[in-house]
Image: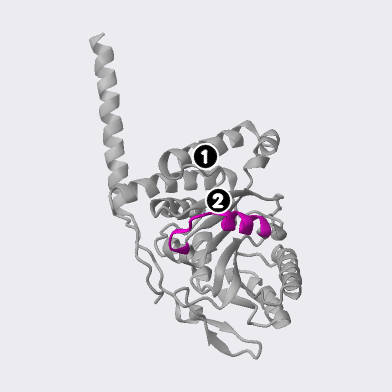
Amino acid sequence: MDFLCEIVQSLVALAALCFIVVLIVAHVTAEMVNLTLHEEEKYFLTASGEKELFPSLHDPHSRELSVVIPAYNEELRMPVMLDEATEYLENRQKQQPSFTYEVIVVDDGSKDKTTEVALRYSRKYGADKVRILTLVKNRGKGGAVRMGTLSSRGKVILMADADGATKFSDIEKVEAGLNALNPKPENMAISCGSRAHLEDDSVAQRSVFRTFLMYGFHFLVWFLCVRGIKDTQCGFKLFTREAALKTFSSLHVERWAFDVELLYIAQCFKIPIAEVAVNWTEIEGSKLVPFWSWLQMGRDLIFIRLRYFTRAWKLQSPRKTD
């Protein structure tokens, strides 16, 4: 009996030591919010080929809607999404002449012709409607979305994936979700597209191991960071300009788990969040590597919680990019 007690005590001591080590590592390796732009990233090309300075999210809005599309090596998948998005937006503008929009494609340091493909749409619709922000080096999806958002002009800002997995016209659903949120403190609100209603079908198609990873990730999200949102990872989210400025100014995680930190920040600021079911189809060519990406996201979730707990990371007041 004494031997068993000693084993239990040793395991508890080992677990405590591991926790302390992880806590120290999380604190020491914490990186600060990086809003610094390379000189080339401050400009977009006009129809005449001249460079023009991107505006700032701190400026008053001058468009009804901004659509921010992060893209890394998306020369093949992106045209389908851009065709669908621009067709919808142009038709909406014809029906509602007062409706104005912009699309910002953020090339996240691609090695293919992503920027060249996006520039074709800029030439077709004009740089006032389609702009390309080409990052000098790869930041990760979260970093790309943030840089595009901080350069946007919209009253509301939609984050949409370049693969077109979510039907673009479902923007009307997330808009309805956003409008239904009342009150909106300081006009801050977020509406998240959700695939939670498709989960039963996806479980039936996945292996037992991948299903285990999925549920494990959902548990960690709920336990460590975000409560009340079933699908934090859907890449179709709509922000009021004020909510985007408040949340993206504090965002640290620049890769796959950035959505979780973004919603964690929103809940810390008590920003209202709606979750709305959207149509979603899996598109081939995902950059997400099932096992290793889940592990990386799991690690990031633990570090998000620990870094805010130790105050290595703090909620920031909005400040301009350098």
Vertical placement of residue 203 versus 82, above or below: above
Q: Nearer the viewer, residue 292 or 179?
A: 179
138 displayed left or right of 76: left
Asked whether residue 245 is in view, the answer is: yes
| Magenta highlight range | 172-187
Image quarter where the C terminus lies is: bottom left
Magenta highlight on residue 25: no
Amino acid type shown at disc 2: Ala
Question: Badge 2 is on which residue?
Answer: 274
204 displayed left or right of 132: right
Number of other residues with Cα within 10 Å of mark 1, as a class: few under 14, some 14 to 19, many 20 or more: some
- Residue at the image point whose x is 30% and y is 31% from the top: 15
The image quadrant of residue 32 is: bottom left
Q: Which numbered circle lies on residue 308?
A: none
Whichever of labels 1 and 2 marks the residue nearer the N terminus, that label is 1
- Residue at the image point whose x is 39% and y is 67% from the top: 34
Image quarter where the N terminus lies is: top left
Amino acid type shown at disc 1: His
Residue 68 is situated, as x and y percent measured from the top left of the image, at 59, 67
- Residue at the image point whose x is 56% and y is 78% from the top: 62
Residue 114 is situated, as x and y percent measured from the top left of the image, at 65, 71
Question: Badge 1 is on which residue?
Answer: 218
Residue 7 is situated, as x and y percent measured from the top left of the image, at 28, 19
